[in-house]
Image: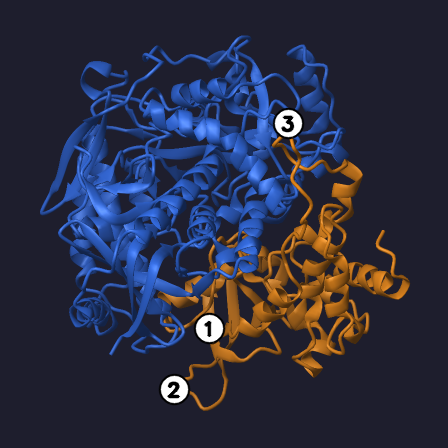
C-alpha cells in the first residue's frame, strides 16, 4: 500500500523556480518539495553567464529597454504584459538574491557587477548594454546554492530522490501528485491543496544538447496524458555555442566579454549577417548563421562546426575594430569565464587562451511548455480556464515571456520572478481552500500499474536503442532548420518508436533504485513530447524566432501571431490563442 | 578503442556481499568515464545503478572511486584514466552502499546542514532598497569555497573520515568557510564554535587527499587551514 502525505502546498522540482516558490509558500503554509534529484543537482546549477536586471550599475539602463529587447528577441510572440512583470520585477528579484547571500561579482564601488549579453541593448544607441548580473560563469550555481541555503534556513521540508509519476487531477482540479521513492521503490501519494510543477526542460529528446540526463519533461508529459494542453511547443532554442559533438554549453558570456565566431577562412562572419550587434545577436539568429556558413562549405575543414575565438589578443583586435576602448588579458578571462575555459580544456583538450574552440549549436531551452497566467496558475485551455490548485514555473512553464526565442539570462529571471509569484499565489490559495477528497487506492493502483507494466515488460526493445534513434532523428529533422516533409517523416518515425516502446525489454526487475525502470519511464515522456513538438512545428507554416521552416522562410503575422495550444489524443490537436500586445507592435527583427 | 571496465557491484535485493563485474566495451578515447558506464548500463546490464545528471562536472551526482581515486565520472576521460586497457570503478568510501555506485548521502548532507550553511545578517537592509555593498577584495576572499558542488569527493577521500564517520569532513568545513569569510555574514563565531567540536576541524590531519579529489579545484586543505587559524587566533582575515 502507498505511503500517504498531506500538505497545503507541494512543489515538484528543486531548481530555481521550485526553490523560490517553496521559500515564499513556506512562509505561511505547510509546504514540501519533491525532487527526483538532490536539490543541488538541479540543472539551474549549470546556468552560467548571468541574470539580467536593469540595475544600471555600470551604465544607463531601464527596465522598459529590457522589456523591449525581450519582446523583440522573442520575435513578437511574447505576451507583453507578462514581459513587463518579468523585467520590472527582475530588479527586486536580483536585489532579493543578494540579500539572501548570493555572492555576485562586484564593481569597484562594491555594487553588483554587470556585463553584456546577446540581444540586450541600449534602446537609444542600439548597442549592447551591460545588464547581466553575474558570479563568474557560474551564476546559476550560485542561485541554486543560495536558494537551497535559504530553504535550509527556513526549514523547508524536502523529499529528495522522489520521482513524480502522476498528477492527481479531477474535473480540472489538482489534488496533488503520486511519486516513486527511488531508494525503496515504494509509492507515495502526496495530497495537497496547491501543487506547483517546476521540473525544468526536456532537451534530452535531442542528441546534441546542453541538457542534463534528467531533463526528460516528466511534468508536461503527464499533463498531456491528463488531456491538458501544452503551449508553443514548436519553439525550442538551439544555443549557438555547444562543445563540438558533446553539446556542453559554453556561455554567451564569452561573447559578452568579447569573443567572436570564426569560419574556416578566419572570417568574423556575424559582421555580414547582423552588422550592428554582430556576435551578440540573439541565439536563434547566431545558430542559423552557423548552419549557413557550414552549408556554404565554410565550416572548419569543411565540417559541421565553426570556431568560438576568445584568445585575448584577438578579442582586443576586435574591440579596437569596433571602437571599444576595453582591453582584456588572459588573467581577466580566467577570472570572468573560469568554468567554460576549463570545459574546453577538459572535454576538447583545447586551451581557449591560445586556440579557437570548436563549437556547434546545441539543443538548450524550451520556450514552450505548460501554459500559465501571470501568477503561475496553469491554464486548462486557450480561452484561459484554470486548472484549480495547479501552478507551473520556470522552464517547464510557458507564461509566455520568451515568445519564439528566449534572450540569454532571461531563464534565470523567469525562475526567480515567476517562482516567487507562484509561491505567493499558492499560499494565498491554500489558506482559503480545503483538501478535496481523493481516492487514494485508485491513484496508487494507477501509478503502480504503469510502473509494473514497464518493470515486468517482456518484449525485445531496449530503451537505450529507442532513445538513441529518437535523439538522432530529432537532430536531423526537428532541429534549427525544418521542412514540412522532414517534420512529417519525424512524426512517422516517432509513431514507430512509440509502438516499439510498447514492446520493451528491461533488465532490472528489482524495486530499490531501479534506474532501468525510471529511465524507460522517462523515455516514454520524451517520445510523447517529441510528437507534440514535431506536430506543432508542422502546423506553424512560418518562420519565427527559434522555429525556422525552409518551406516558409518568412514570419507571417497575418496567420501566426498566435500561440499554439496542443492536446494529445489519438493525434495531436492544435488550437490558437492571440498574443497579448500592449505597447510594441510587431516590426521586422533586425540587429 | 577497447576498454575493460571492472565495476564493484552490489544489489541489496540479490547479493550477500559485493562482487566485481567485468565488461569489455568499445569506446572513443575522448569519451567520459560516465559514457563508458552508460555503455554498460544501456547495452549490457541495465541493473547497473549510478547517480548522474549534468554530465559535465557541475551537478556533483556521479562521484565515485576511479582507479582508486575519487573523481566525477563525467569529468574524467577514458584516455586519461585507462591503464593496461582497464579502468576500475568503485563506490566512494565511508558511506553505506545502497546499490552499486549509489551510497547513502544523508549523513553527508546532515554534516552540511549542521554548520549553518546560509548567510546570517540581521542588520537593516540598505535604505535605498539596493544591494549590500561588498568590495571586490572582500568578495574574492571566499571565492574558492563558493565553487563547492557538494559531490562528497573530498570528504570520502579523507582518512580521518574513513576512521570516524562522525567527523564533519572537508566539504562541510569548506561550506562553513564560504560564510565565515564573507564580509556580509555575522555568524562566524557560532560556526567556529561548531567546528571546534571534538568531531570538527581538528580531526583534519592535513593528508591533502581532499585537495587532490576536488573536481572543482578548490584548495580544500588550505581552506581547512584558514578555519583552523581563525579558531586558533580568534581573528578572521
The alpha-carbon separation of the residues under discs 1 and 2 comes to: 20 Å
Q: Any mark on residue B23, and which?
A: 1
Which residue is at a point 73% across and 24% down the rendered structure image?
A313
The residue mark sitting in front, 1 or 2, is 2
What residue would you read off at disc 2?
A: B14
The alpha-carbon separation of the residues under discs 2 and 3 comes to: 55 Å
The residue mark sitting in front, 2 or 3, is 3
Residue at mark 2 shares a chain with residue at mark 3: no
What residue would you read off at disc 3?
A: A257
| Chain identity of mark 1 | B
Q: Name the spot of residue A492 as percent of width and height, x first.
A: 16, 43
| Of residues A82 and B173, the one drawn nearer to the viewer in this rendering | A82
Q: Is residue B26 visible?
A: no
Which residue is at a point 70% across and 17% down the rendered structure image?
A317
Q: Residues within 10 Å of mark 1 (few under 14, many from 20)?
A: some
Left or right of A188 on screen, residue B211: right
| Chain identity of mark 3 | A
Q: Name the spot of residue B63 as percent of width and height, x first.
A: 57, 65
Q: Secondary structure at mark 2?
A: loop
Which residue is at a point 76% across and 68% down the rendered structure image?
B193
Q: Secondary structure at mark 3?
A: loop
Q: Colour of chain A?
A: blue
Where, by quadrant of the figure, is residue A161 drawn? bottom left
Q: Secondary structure at mark 1?
A: strand
Q: Is residue A420 visible?
A: yes
In this view, the residue farthest toward the bottom is B16
The alpha-carbon separation of the residues under discs 1 and 3 comes to: 45 Å
Q: Colour of chain B?
A: orange
In this view, the residue farthest toward the right is B233
| Of residues A94 and A123, the one drawn nearer to the viewer in this rendering | A94
Amino acid at each position: 500500500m502507498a505511503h500517504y502525505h498531506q500538505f497545503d502546498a507541494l512543489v515538484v522540482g528543486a531548481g530555481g523556480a521550485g526553490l523560490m516558490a517553496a521559500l515564499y509558500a513556506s512562509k505561511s503554509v505547510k509546504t514540501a518539495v519533491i525532487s527526483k534529484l538532490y536539490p543541488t543537482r538541479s540543472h539551474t546549477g549549470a546556468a552560467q553567464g548571468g541574470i539580467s536586471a536593469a540595475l544600471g550599475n555600470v551604465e544607463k539602463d531601464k527596465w522598459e529597454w529590457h522589456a523591449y529587447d525581450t519582446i523583440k528577441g522573442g520575435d513578437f510572440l511574447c505576451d507583453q504584459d507578462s514581459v513587463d512583470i518579468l523585467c520590472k520585477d527582475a530588479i527586486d528579484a536580483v536585489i532579493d538574491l543578494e540579500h539572501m547571500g548570493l555572492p555576485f561579482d562586484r564593481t569597484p564601488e562594491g555594487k553588483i557587477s554587470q556585463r553584456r549579453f546577446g540581444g540586450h541593448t541600449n534602446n537609444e544607441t542600439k548597442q549592447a548594454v551591460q545588464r547581466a548580473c553575474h558570479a563568474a560563469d557560474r551564476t546559476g550555481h550560485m542561485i541554486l546554492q543560495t536558494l537551497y541555503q535559504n530553504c535550509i534556513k527556513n526549514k523547508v521540508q524536502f523529499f529528495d530522490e522522489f520521482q513524480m509519476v502522476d498528477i492527481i487531477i479531477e474535473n480540472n482540479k489538482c489534488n496533488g501528485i503520486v511519486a516513486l521513492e527511488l531508494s525503496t521503490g515504494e509509492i507515495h501519494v502526496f495530497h495537497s491543496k496547491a501543487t506547483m510543477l517546476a521540473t525544468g526542460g526536456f532537451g534530452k529528446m535531442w542528441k546534441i544538447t546542453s541538457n542534463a540526463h534528467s531533463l526528460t519533461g516528466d511534468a508536461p508529459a503527464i499533463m498531456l496524458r491528463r488531456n491538458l494542453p501544452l503551449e508553443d511547443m514548436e519553439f525550442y532554442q538551439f544555443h549557438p555555442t555547444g562543445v563540438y559533438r558533446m553539446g556542453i554549453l559554453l556561455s554567451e558570456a564569452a561573447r559578452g566579454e568579447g569573443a567572436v565566431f570564426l569560419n574556416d577562412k578566419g572570417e568574423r562572419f556575424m559582421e555580414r549577417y547582423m552588422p550592428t550587434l554582430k556576435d551578440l545577436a540573439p541565439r536563434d539568429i547566431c545558430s542559423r548563421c552557423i548552419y549557413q556558413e557550414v552549408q556554404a562549405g565554410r565550416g572548419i575543414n569543411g565540417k559541421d562546426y565553426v570556431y568560438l575565438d576568445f584568445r585575448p589578443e584577438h578579442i582586443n583586435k576586435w574591440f579596437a575594430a569596433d571602437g571599444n576602448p576595453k582591453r582584456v588579458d588572459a588573467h581577466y578571462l580566467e577570472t570572468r569565464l573560469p568554468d567554460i575555459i576549463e570545459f574546453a580544456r577538459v572535454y576538447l583538450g583545447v586551451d581557449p587562451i591560445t586556440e579557437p574552440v570548436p563549437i556547434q549549436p546545441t539543443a538548450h531551452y524550451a520556450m514552450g511548455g505548460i501554459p500559465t497566467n501571470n501568477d503561475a496558475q496553469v491554464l486548462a485551455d486557450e480561452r484561459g480556464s484554470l486548472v484549480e490548485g495547479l501552478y507551473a514555473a520556470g522552464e517547464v512553464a510557458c507564461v509566455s515571456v520568451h515568445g519564439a526565442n528566449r534572450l540569454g539570462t532571461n531563464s534565470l529571471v523567469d525562475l526567480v520572478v515567476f517562482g516567487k509569484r507562484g509561491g505567493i499565489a499558492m499560499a494565498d490559495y491554500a489558506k482559503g481552500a480545503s483538501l478535496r477528497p481523493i481516492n487514494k487506492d485508485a491513484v496508487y493502483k494507477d501509478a503502480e500499474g504503469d510502473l509494473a507494466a514497464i518493470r515486468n515488460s517482456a518484449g525485445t526493445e531496449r530503451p537505450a536503442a529507442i532513445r538513441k534513434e529518437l535523439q538522432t532523428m530529432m537532430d536531423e529533422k526537428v532541429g534549427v532548420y525544418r521542412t514540412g516533409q522532414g517534420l512529417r517523416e519525424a512524426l512517422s518515425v516517432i509513431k514507430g518508436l512509440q509502438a516499439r516502446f510498447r514492446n520493451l525489454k528491461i533488465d532490472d526487475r528489482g524495486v530499490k533504485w531501479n534506474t532501468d525502470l525510471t529511465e524507460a519511464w522517462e523515455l516514454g515522456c520524451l517520445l510523447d513530447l517529441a510528437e507534440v513538438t514535431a506536430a506543432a512545428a508542422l502546423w506553424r507554416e512560418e518562420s519565427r524566432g527559434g522555429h525556422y521552416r525552409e518551406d516558409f522562410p518568412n514570419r507571417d503575422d497575418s496567420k501566426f501571431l498566435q500561440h499554439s495550444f496542443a492536446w494529445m489524443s489519438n493525434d495531436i490537436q492544435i488550437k490558437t490563442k492571440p498574443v497579448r500586445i500592449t505597447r510594441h507592435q510587431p516590426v521586422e527583427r533586425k540587429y | 578503442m577497447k576498454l575493460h571496465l571492472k565495476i564493484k557491484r552490489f544489489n541489496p535485493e540479490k547479493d550477500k556481499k559485493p562482487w566485481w563485474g567485468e565488461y569489455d566495451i568499445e569506446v572513443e578515447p575522448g569519451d567520459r568515464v560516465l559514457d563508458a558506464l552508460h555503455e554498460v548500463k544501456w547495452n549490457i546490464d541495465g541493473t547497473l545503478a549510478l547517480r548522474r545528471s549534468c554530465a559535465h562536472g557541475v551537478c556533483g551526482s556521479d562521484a565515485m572511486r576511479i582507479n582508486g581515486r575519487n573523481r566525477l565520472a563525467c569529468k574524467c576521460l577514458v584516455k586519461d584514466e585507462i591503464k593496461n586497457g582497464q579502468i576500475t570503478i568503485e563506490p566512494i568510501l565511508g558511506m553505506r552502499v545502497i546499490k552499486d555506485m549509489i551510497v547513502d548521502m544523508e549523513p553527508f548532507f546532515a554534516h552540511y546542514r549542521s554548520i549553518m550553511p546560509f548567510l546570517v545578517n540581521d542588520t537593516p537592509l540598505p535604505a535605498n532598497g539596493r544591494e549590500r555593498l561588498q568590495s571586490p577584495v572582500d568578495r574574492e576572499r571566499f571565492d574558492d569555497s563558493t565553487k563547492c558542488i557538494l559531490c562528497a569527493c573530498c570528504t570520502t577521500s579523507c582518512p580521518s573520515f574513513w576512521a570516524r564517520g562522525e567527523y564533519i569532513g572537508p566539504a562541510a568545513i569548506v561550506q562553513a568557510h564560504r560564510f565565515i569569510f564573507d564580509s556580509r555574514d555575522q555568524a562566524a563565531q557560532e560556526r567556529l564554535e561548531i567546528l571546534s567540536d571534538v568531531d570538527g576541524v581538528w580531526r583534519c590531519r592535513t593528508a591533502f587527499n581532499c585537495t587532490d579529489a576536488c573536481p572543482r579545484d578548490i584548495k580544500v586543505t588550505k581552506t581547512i587551514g584558514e578555519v583552523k587559524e581563525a579558531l586558533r587566533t580568534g581573528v578572521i582575515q
